[in-house]
Amino acid sequence: MTYDYLIVGAGLFGCVCAHELHSAGKTCKVIDRRSHIAGNIYTEKQNGIQVHRYGAHIFHTSDREVWEYVNEYAEFNNYINSPIARYHNELYNLPFNMNTFSKMWGVVTPDEAKAVIAKQVQEAGITNPQNLEEQALSLAGRDIYEKLIKEYTQKQWGRPCTELPAFIIKRLPFRFVYDNNYFNDRYQGIPVGGYTQIAEKLLADVPVELNKDFLTSASEIQIENQSYYEMDGDLFRNVIYTGMIDAFFHYQYGPLEYRSLKFETEVLPDCDNYQGNAVVNYTSADVPFTRIIEHKHFEFGKDSETREPIHGTIITREYPASWQKGMEPYYPVNDEKNAALYAKYKALAEEKKNVIFGGRLGMYRYFDMDKVIRAALDTVNTMI
């Protein structure tokens, strides 16, 4: 069979593209090297709890069209992301707001908090930050940097803050109100029953093959001066590729840098409430993981189908890791060196007239979920 499109990757970008192209009358097939669809937003029900297998995903957006789009495929609850930061045995609210400042310094008014921050910034005496540490000190002062930024960031990136570029922290959002809502977006929530259902509905009318690696299964061929991709006897006029752009070109210029993650999930049948919050960040260096996710709190401790309280709980510890070939790449390292290397791969990509590179790995860019959907919708609109 000859298809219009082969979509490589059943994550959010690939699912939206496949659905929209199919709706426009194009023939599509989706493949994914994993054993499941939905990519990193994959959720799986266990003991009545929707477990986020690849880390916490909270949907938030100010794009009304995108919000209405996802609500066609799932009902969203009114979950508000309000993470807690734990530094040794001290607990602080995130993002930095009056609750944070009051706990840290005993202040009660915005003017008092601003005065403490201004004093510490002045004492730091940094006017031209040369690295992340200096940038953070020039914005937040020493207390916030030492307790809530320094060691957490070093765990996340695997290197000292003095070796990280200043632009990673272009600014630090301070809220001088008592508001623990992490996001400023108009719309926010978690799909009742998890994220996987969204991918299932988007791909309901599109053939999908799992455990299939494009790079080892497909080959480019020429037929009557027309370029096709061939896989298992099928031909594809075009490819939408959401994998690693450097891997597509066989690391011709060398590998781009990524950060990876390792997840350690534990079922606690005799504990109904492990930490009292869905997400707790561990900011001190003596703890090897960066955060613990308690999944049941995303749906307020109730079964998504029966709405009955869930007994027991499931937690996941999240460990940052240096990426190596064969590992899952989660975060592109968007520093100047990698930006220059990506520019070379992007130039190669632009020469591939029948291949579109999209998503977090194809575009070597960190995307929130709403931005992935917007990018996919815009890509398809351009194509059709």
Image (spheres, rainbow, N blue to C red):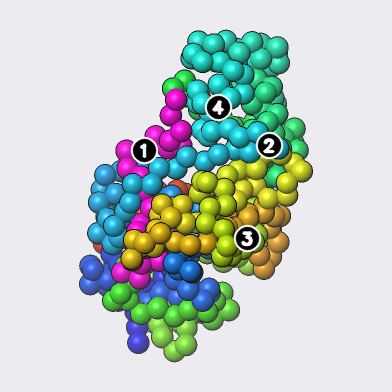
**Please, what is the three-letter code of the amino acid marked with disc 1?**
Asp
164 on left or right of 232: right
The quadrant in which residue 7 appears is bottom left
Q: Badge 3: how crowded within 10 Å, few (<14), some, or many (20+)?
A: some
Secondary structure of the residue carrying tag 4 is helix
Side of 19 where 105 appears, left or right: right
Residue 185 image label: 1
Q: CA distance from mark 2 to mark 4?
A: 15 Å
Magenta extent = 178-201
Identify the image quadrant of the N terminus: bottom left
Of badges 1 and 2, nearer the viewer stands 2
Secondary structure predominantly adopted by residues drawn in magenta: loop
Q: Earlier in the sequence, mark 2 or mark 3?
A: 2
Q: Amino acid at mark 4?
A: Thr
Q: Residue at x 34, y 61 (%)?
A: 307
Q: Earlier in the sequence, mark 3 or mark 4?
A: 4
Q: Is residue 29 above or below residue 242?
A: below
Q: Residue at x 67, y 39 (%)?
A: 283
